[in-house]
Amino acid sequence: MEKAYILIGCELGAENEIVGKILRLDKVKDARVVYGDYDIVVEAETDTESQMDNLITKKIRKIGKVRSTMTLGVVN
């Protein structure tokens, strides 16, 4: 089991729209708008590392108005 927190930077004003889209993705446990250097934090759990890679690179990063991501992988 892979678990990660994904920090997202996005366009100003797009936070709630992006959170709504992310919460519909399979393997996403939670997504919240936050204050600080990043705009959104996502909690995700997948069965494999390749599934996590797919979630981040092919789904989250492809959402319009997402500008950057930083992934914090949880150490088992």
Image (tube, grey):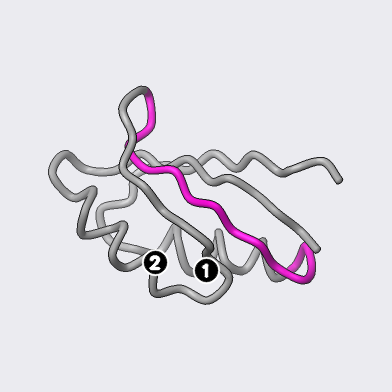
In screen coordinates, is 9 left or right of 74? left
- In the image, residue 3 lies in the stretch drawn in magenta: no
Query: Image quarter for residue 68?
Result: top left
Dot 1 alpha-carbon crowd within 10 angstroms: few under 14, some 14 to 19, many 20 or more? few
Taking the view exactly as shown, the residue that stands out farthest to the right is: 76
Marks 2/1: CA distance? 15 Å
The percent coordinates of residue 43 (x first, y second) are 55, 52
Report the magenta residues as a range.
37-50
Q: Residue at x 21, y 53 (%)?
A: 16
Residue 7 location (% of width, % of height): 48, 40
Residue at (29% x, 43% y) in the render: 10
Residue 29 placement, left or right of 40: right
Q: Position of residue 6 (x, y in %)?
A: 53, 46
Q: Is residue 74 above or below residue 23?
A: above
Q: In the picture, residue 12 is in which quadrant?
A: top left
Q: Residue at x 76, y 58 (%)?
A: 2
Question: Depth-wise, is mark 2 or mark 1 nearer the camera?
Answer: 2
Numbered circle sitting on residue 23 = 2
Left or right: 1 in relation to 42 = right
* SS at badge 2: helix
User: Does the magenta segment cover residue 38?
Assistant: yes
The answer to whether 36 is drawn above or below residue 22 in the figure is above
Q: Which one is earlier in the sequence, the residue at label 2 or at label 1?
A: 2
Name the residue type under label 1: Lys
Q: Is residue 49 left or right of residue 38?
A: right
Q: Nearer the viewer, residue 67 or 52?
A: 52
Mark 2 Cα shell of 10 Å, populated few (<14), some (14-19), many (≥20): some
Q: Amino acid at mark 2?
A: Leu
* Labelled disc at residue 36: none
In front here: 61 or 19?
19
- Residue 3, quarter of picture: bottom right
Which residue is denoted by mark 1 in the rendering? 58
